[in-house]
Image (cartoon, helix red, strand yellow):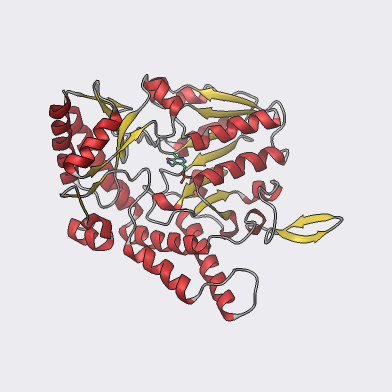
Amino acid sequence: MLSSKEYEEIFPALKRKINGHKLIYLDNAATTLRPKEVMDAVNEYSLNHHANVHRSTHTLAAEATKYYEDARSKVANFINSETEEVIFTKGATESLNLIAYSIADSNILRSDDEILISTIEHHANFVPWQQIAKIFNLKIKYYPAKSGIFDLSDFLKHITNKTRLVSITALSNVTGQLIPVNTLIKQIRNIRQDVIIVVDGAQAVPHLPIDVKKMDCDFIAFSGHKMLGPTGIGVLYGKRKYLNEMTPFLFGGEMIDKVSTDGTTFNVLPYKFEAGTPNVDGAVGLAKAIEILERIGMDNIQEHEKQLTSYALKKLKELDFLEIFGPQDETQQSIISFNIKGVHPHDVAHLLNDLTGIAIRSGHHCAQPLMKEFGTSATCRISFYVYNEEEDVDKLCDGLKKVWEWLK
Ligand code: PMP
């Protein structure tokens, strides 16, 4: 990992002062800071090579297409997939909606098939399945994660001979619990071969090495802005055999083969799922972000965050005015949720920002079913990335003591 001075050069926002204090950014699960290199790459493309992709024959159009398709190859290489199995979307939310709608519409799921999801999911991996079940008359089952902790063997008990699709996060956006998805997928496949497995990788892909072939998931969804890239670009990886069978989600230009008054046939993968002019700037930015992550090394990132998370858990546990949620052990990475007893999390977040320049998130984190398991409506959440260090945790703990003194 680099020194904090080196990270300040890469991420200009780290040099900012907030209310007279040096910014400490602990809201990485919401979105990560922007490296200058990513924005420079987007600018270089936009100012010198921008044109519409896959259409015109002129030089700029050919260059723009090459930038876009090179970005796709970069993503494919990053997750070890085939290039045509990478579909660019707006983000993880759109990717998950795409899978849910298209798979239900393509008759891969039949009316008494069961979809299994858990109560630890982000709304983006919860609501689309609920809605799709309603529209297409499918059954939806929920694995209740007791006390908000996902238990593998308990989860497996919910697989029945009707389960046809499981959608699960690889890392909880509230507790940072790392779900052992590789083992989970193997065990599901031992019970039933034909279960379709969707992984919400929004919090995992930015923070640990992901190999879709090793994992053997059928789909994985993630967002560029949570991994140093721009907003408005995301990825859906899907196995070719399913993508080929699925109905497109959006219709229009680019996604067609032939159009006539008799009907329309669709383009090959991945274009079949990319209707309209895509976000080329976003794809270029994401490719550069991946280059930076690969330079640091995904193994190093995971190791760094695991150490930092365990240090933070140890320090936070020393503060007896806190209630911490989640497993509170080594199964957690990069995210911790807690509350100051008797104080609303929004007040804590506001005061931390104003008194100490520390940015954290407060709220339900788009995970209301999980909040219910915790018996609360909201929590404070801290989340780390490459540029965070133990000193940030020490300052957070000092800040929390200040907030507690202020409010108690
Ligand atoms: N899933 C998880 C686990 C997330 O944390 C998020 C973002 N908070 C999403 C899905 C949705 O991502 P986006 O808002 O970028 O579409």
Q: Residue visible at 71% across and 40% down? A: 105
Give coordinates of residue 163: x percent, y percent: 62, 28
Query: In the rendered image, which quarter contains the C terminus?
Result: top left
Up/down of 153 relative to 21, above or below:
above
Question: Above or below — where is 321 with respect to 288?
Answer: above
Q: In the displayed structure, does residue 44 sit left or right of residue 265?
A: left
Query: Can residue 152 be seen?
Result: no
Where in the image, quadrant-wise, is ligand 1 located? Answer: top left
Say left or right for 159 vs 389. right
- Quick one: 398 or 332, which is closer to the camera? 398
Question: Residue shown at 49%/28% (left/top)?
Answer: 118
**Residue found farthest to the bottom:** 59
Place of residue 31 in the rendered image (x, y in percent of width and height, measured from the top left): 37, 48
Which residue is pictured at 26% across the width and 39% down the height? 309
The residue lying furthest to the right in this view is 262
- Tell me the quarter of the picture where residue 344 sits: top left
Residue 385 point in image, percent of width and height:
30, 48
Q: Is residue 24 visible?
A: yes
For image coordinates 18% across by 47% down, the residue present is 19
For the N terminus, the quadrant is: bottom left
Q: How far across and how far down the image is residue 282, in percent?
A: 48, 60
Q: Nearer the viewer, residue 233 or 342?
A: 342
How many numbered circles are shown?
A: 0
